[in-house]
Each structure stands twice: as C-alpha cells, then as structure tokens.
Image (cartoon, helix red, strand yellow):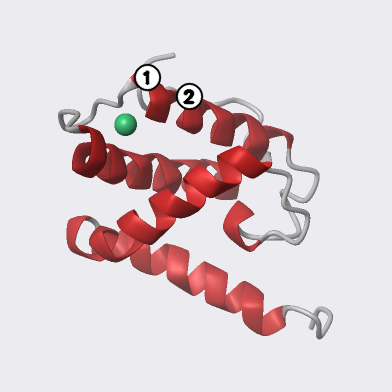
C-alpha cells in the first residue's frame, strides 16, 4: 500500500494515531538503522504494519485515544517492547520534527488520563 493511502473503515482518530506512530517509527529507524527519510527498513516496516493491524482491529477504538494508553494492551509482548523503544526515542524528538502532531498526541493522551477511572462526564 502506498504511503498516505486512505484506510477505509478507520475513524479519524485511528488515522491520526497511525500517522503519529508511523512518524515516530520513521524517526527511530533513521536514528537507529540509518534509513533514508520517508523510508523504513524491513524490521521497522513490519512493526508499522503490525501497529496498523492492531489499530484497525482494536475493539476500543471509540472509547480510548491511543494504543499507548489503552488498558487492553493488545500488542504482542515483543512488539510492545519495540513500540515502547520507538516511543521513548522518538517522543521527545518528535517535538522538534513535528511539534503540532506531537502536541496533539500529548493533549489527547493527557485528556484520556485525566478522565481515566472517574467515569465519563
Ligand atoms: Zn528500522
């Protein structure tokens, strides 16, 4: 599937999450695997595909914001480790590369955390 292809069946929120995650994996891959801009090595492409699958099939798509703050944790342990490494590395850097996207992600995550456990308003 070409980069930026529309994913039918995904909500706006899911599309946004995928965009952020792909961006983060790209930053990580460039830093760790020396890939070129807008390209991923085979390993990172596998991870990106995996995340896309999880997001598309997530049963909680409408009730939570991002898989990183999801209570279900449907990621396979090995993949979770990889995505966490990506987030740790790319999270702060994303503020430099794409401040608006990173901020939107942080705001959504915070909003979700604030609401968590207290029920819905
Ligand atoms: Zn890579």
Quarter holding ligand 1: top left
Task: Classify 22 as above or below 88.
Answer: above
Residue 102, image x, y percentages: 35, 62
The residue that appears at 70% across and 60% down in the rendered structure is: 64
Residue 115 in percent (x, y) is at: 71, 81
Depth order, front residue of 39/19:
39
Q: Is residue 80 left or right of residue 92?
A: right
Residue at x 15%, y 28% (from the top left corner):
36
Q: Residue furthest right?
A: 119
Tell whether 87 sits left or right of 72.
left
Name the residue tied to disc 1: 42
Q: Counting other residues with Cα less than 10 Å from the Cα at mark 2, is it few (<14), some (14-19), or many (20 or more)? A: few
Q: CB atoms at circles 1 and 2 under 8 Å apart?
A: yes
The image shows a total of numbered marks equal to: 2
As drawn, the label of residue 103 is: none
Residue drawn at (47%, 32%), measured in percent from left and top?
48
* Ligand 1 lies under 8 Å from the Cβ of mark 1: yes
What residue sits right under mark 2 in the picture? 46
Pinpoint residue 30: horizontal percent, then vertical percent.
21, 38
Disc 2 is placed on an element classified as: helix
């Amino acid at each position: 599937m070409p980069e930026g292809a529309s994913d039918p069946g995904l909500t706006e929120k899911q599309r946004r999450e995928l965009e952020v995650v792909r961006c983060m994996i790209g930053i990580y891959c460039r830093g760790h695997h020396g890939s070129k801009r807008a390209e991923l090595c085979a390993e990172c492409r596998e991870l990106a595909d995996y995340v896309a699958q999880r997001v598309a099939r997530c049963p909680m798509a409408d009730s939570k914001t991002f898989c990183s703050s999801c209570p279900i944790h449907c990621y396979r342990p090995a993949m979770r480790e990889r995505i966490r490494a990506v987030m740790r590395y790319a999270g702060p850097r994303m503020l430099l590369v794409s401040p608006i996207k990173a901020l939107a992600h942080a705001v959504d995550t915070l909003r979700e955390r604030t609401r968590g456990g207290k029920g819905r308003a």
